[in-house]
Structure formats: structure tokens, C-alpha cells
Image (cartoon, grey):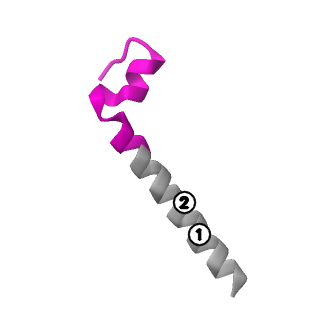
Amino acid sequence: MQWGSLSEFLAMGGYGLYVWGSYLVTGLCILIELFSLRKN
């Protein structure tokens, strides 16, 4: 795929909210897991 601009890339064809939101949730879960493992 090719995007003409950064805003088109971030929009992901209208699914950007879902794509970037899932990356954010996954990243937060990984961070929480790492902190909880480090705490014990």
C-alpha cells in the first residue's frame, strides 16, 4: 500500500482508530505485565 501523506497513513483507510487503539491497548498490557513481573 502507498499513502500520499502522513494523515492518510494514520487514518488507515478509515480504520485508524481501531488499528492504533489496538496497538495502544496491547502496549499498555505489555507494560502492566512487565511492571507486575518486576514487582514480584
User: Disc 1 on helix, strand or loop?
Assistant: helix
Tell me the residue at 60%/64% (across/down). 31
In the rendered image, the vertical position of residue 31 relative to residue 20, given as above or below? below
Residue drawn at (63%, 78%), measured in percent from left and top?
Answer: 36
Within-10-Å neighbours for mark 1: few <14, some 14–19, many 20+: few
- Residue that protrudes farthest toward the right in the picture: 39
Separation of marks 1 and 2 at Cα, in angstroms: 6 Å
- Quadrant where the N terminus is found in the figure: top left
Magenta stretch encompasses residue 8: yes
Q: Is residue 9 above or below residue 37?
A: above
In depth, the one of 16 and 1 nearer the eye is 16
Coordinates of residue 34 in the picture (x, y in percent): 62, 71
Image coords of residue 10 (percent x, y): 43, 28
Q: Is residue 40 left or right of residue 26?
A: right
Quarter containing the C terminus: bottom right
Of helix, strand and loop, which mostly describes the magenta segment? helix
Closer-to-camera residue (14/39): 14
Describe the element under mark 2 as helix, strand or loop: helix
In the picture, residue 38 is in which quadrant? bottom right
Q: Which residue is mark 2?
A: 28
Q: Is residue 16 above or below residue 26?
A: above
Magenta highlight on residue 21:
no
Kind of residue at badge 2? Leu
Kindly check if marks 1 and 2 are in contact, taking CB atoms under 8 A apart as contact: yes
The percent position of residue 17, horizontal first and vertical second, equals 38, 38
Magenta residue span: 1-20
Query: Image point 36% across, 17% down: which residue?
Result: 3
What numbered label is drawn on residue 32?
1
